[in-house]
Amino acid sequence: MSVDRALEGTGAWLDDRLHGARGVRVLLRKVFPDHWSFLLGEIVLYSFIILLLTGTFLTLWFQPSMTDIIYHGSYVPLRGVRMSEAYASTLHISFDVRGGLLIRQIHHWAADLFMAGIFAHMLRVFFTGAYRKPREINWLIGITLLTLGLLEGLFGYSLPDDLLSGAGLRILEGVIQSIPIVGTYLAFFLFGGPFPGTQIVPRLYILHVLVIPALILALVSAHLFLMFHQKHTQMPGKGRTNENVVGAPMYPYFMAKTGAFFFFVFAVLTLAATFTQINPIWLYGPFNPVAMSAGSQPDFYMGMLEGALRVMPAWQWVPWGHTFAFNVFIPALVPLGLVFTLAAIWPFLEQWVTGDKREHHVNDRPRNAPTRTALGIGVITFYGILWAEGANDIIADQLNVPLYWITWAARVGIFVGPVIAYIITKRICLGLQHKDNHLIEHGVETGIIRQLPGGEFIEETRPVDADSLAVLMSRTNYPPLPSGETAETDVPSRSMRGGLGRVRERLYNVVTESSALPEPNGHAIGDGNGHAIGDGNGHAVEGNGHGHTAISSGATSSQADSDEGDGH
Amino acid sequence: MSNSSPGQSGAGDSGEQSWPEYLTGAESRGAAAAAAEGSVPPEGRAAPHRVIGTPAPAAARTLLADAGDAGDSGEKPVREMPAGPPDPIRAKKAERIVVACFLLAMLAGFGFLVAYGTIGVGTITKTLHSNLALGATLSLVFLLLGIGAVIWVRHLMPEVELTEQRHPMRSTPQEREAFKGTFEEGAETSQFVKRPMVRRSLIAATLPLAVAPIFLLRDLGPLPGTSLDTTAWRKGLRLLVYGTGRPITPAEFSSPGAIVSVGPEGFLNDDDAMAKAAVIIIKFRPGQLQFTSANHAVANKVVENWTVNDIVAYSKICTHVGCPAALYEQTTHHILCPCHQSTFDATQGARVIFGPATRPLPQLPIGVDSEGFLIATSDFHEPVGPSFWERS
């Protein structure tokens, strides 16, 4: 057999030198859990690979130079126009290199997909609690990658030196200048003098094609290595615990699936680049500091910063001959800084509040962490309102609403919206938990009405099948705080005394708020106190693992139904 | 939480790191393994559901957690996955589809090469056609490869679900102890701890090195000095229309509501200069401008001495973050910056009436030269553009 020969030949040659047989075999057999949401991170990875491939192609023709030239290329409307070499070479790629326009558009679409994928992946990780111990480091690497992605994107779309990107750089310069004390110096150092100068494009170019991609590549590698080493999290389900990982082996399943997925990502980007125009720099024209078109918009991932700049009232403070431009540096630094900081400290804050130092490898369903989910939706609302405000002129134009109303709505909305979103989300989560409780406790309604001998009508229910039950019962129960009430003595432990301890206790009650799990098919257990049901819960799931003994307690007759797994 | 049922397979249990009590639930060890053996595979297929061997404690620390399993190494591996799909007839059908997809992908790939060779670029239409042909064929290649691979995985490969054990990331106390010992031994042998002067002098040696990069970056740009306080405008420079480069007389610019972008004579093609010196001039009807007779900027007023026949000149550089404030609404006399919607009232000295800008657009003093053309009578009397720290 040819596989045998290959193994004997190449494999033996390599193994003689690398001693790989055992390690690689384990690698081939490595189990990967499956869930559609795990593909989000893969979208990011493949977009990044496509960015590297297409980006390299573009560098073969792109000239990162701000030297003025007169255009004589193929794009007739701009012939004879003064422009930078960077802009002219981008036109050259678009109109004089076969496949250049396609690759350029794939590159831009891939950048957008890369960022969108990061956001989606990050939200998945947050809402399922996949950032929890032991994955905090990977969460922080992810936030760093998001930050680098923002910069990489901003620098990338600034390179063609067209009118739109020039405006973006002008805004960047204005923002940097607003930083107290050092701002003016930083701006002059970055631009090599006054704006626009001739330095900024070559400088951004080297950052864009070498420094930041290298950092991203290194961090992506670390990210993947840790994912590999710690093994991927899995969604709750029958037989899935914190001490195993259930799924298909990397070889051949994961490799084939992920290969297919790479082709799909590439296909979608190519389709987008073929049939939808993106960043048509030839329509914007070359940069000049005097012109600006209405409806100018950055790429979507900068929209939140743009919105923050737009929503800010005109505040400044001019003491002792210096200017604090609150109207610029507060919106530039505070909203996004707040979101990132909160995201970065959240795993540690949650751990401190709940005292939960366990490893978690089974993901939470978002409803089962009502406070976390509500907080996440609150942050999304905050971010989303600013993001929409970044297009306030477009919205005003399309919806025929006065522009200033939208800005005022956003000014109020960023404070009120997240609170409302938090409250509503929490209610929805708790409601969904109650629905789950009902299913666990009473089973699935069958629609069959039965008359009892006494004349009473009841609707027949069927116990939830074991697979679904395992999902329904997957609720983290947090160990109680080491407070005076639950400790053996009445004296609160040292960490719980004092103001910080009281704050922690209060936060604990908020963060761990969750409805108590009932026992399957009857007998609600616990005292309604979310964290007092640890044991019962553990037993229930374990029973579930054994087969169906636990759920059969009140419904032996329906056992056959649940075994077939035809639930709902 | 559902996952508090531990899945230690019986044999591997003994030497394991201990999990916290609340995690393991004491008596339930081996439960998952038992469950795994007895569980019904999804959709009733003959999919094996097995627990891969549990590594010995030492091996659990290797890079890929499971390497070095005593039970696995050296022996012929036990088959854990079925060799073929459960339904050969369906598999045959799937095989045909997969092969068709891959062959079509190949054809599309050839199509791409042909399109590259036959469709040129160089005009807008040709580029459009080339882009469509190259993009469509390339999309097809990837799409068909993806579809083929997915059908392959789903219908040709038998469904398999394996269970692998996890182990706490935390090393055993013995391993930690051993690490500590090795580390301390190294530290001791190196004399790094014992001889503090070596340590301190080494740290001292690296200090200047650490700040050297900051010094090296100093020449990235000149210091700003007072360069942001002034623009290229000075007394006597004509206002040239941006785009045509022609000077302009008040008579030419006499219809109320007209607006034009201008720059200083000799600097129109100098982007650095224009980034500060760009100016808009707007013509008003008599009586529309709210004048002050002062010779310096006054809040909410237009300096009358700096205008010519109700033509007023404002800096075009937005005082927010420096975008060109390029939009003008005749009926309301509002100048609007398209970047962040700062809005200025042109009749009231470009007072900010909405948006994030804190200061009015500075007014440029203009007059008329001997030939009747509009000229600047001085530079701006304050720095133009966005705020900066040194601006008072």
Image (cartoon, coloured by chain):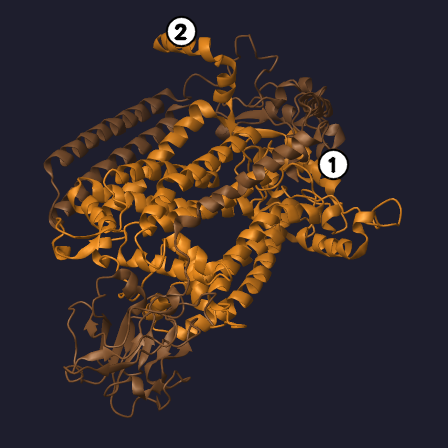
Q: Chain of mark 1?
A: B
Judge the density around disc 2: few (<14), some (14-19), many (≥20) Cα neighbours within 10 Å: few
Q: Is residue A484 left or right of residue A441?
A: right
Residue A468 visible in image: no
Tell which of A368 and A453 is nearer to you.
A368
Q: Which chain is orange?
A: A
Residue that carries the numbered disc 1 in the rendered image:
B22
Residue that carries the numbered disc 2 in the rendered image:
A8
Q: Is residue A336 left or right of residue A522?
A: left
Q: Does residue B265 lie above or below A343 as drawn?
A: below
Measure the alpha-carbon separation of dots 1 and 2: 50 Å
Residue at image coords 18%, 44%:
B132
> Disc 2 residue type?
Glu
Q: Which chain is brown?
A: B
Q: Does residue A257 lie above or below A430 as drawn?
A: above
Q: Position of residue A146 (x, y in %)?
A: 47, 46
Tell which of A201 and B20 is nearer to you.
A201
Could you say whether the residue bearing mark 2 is in a helix, strand or loop? helix
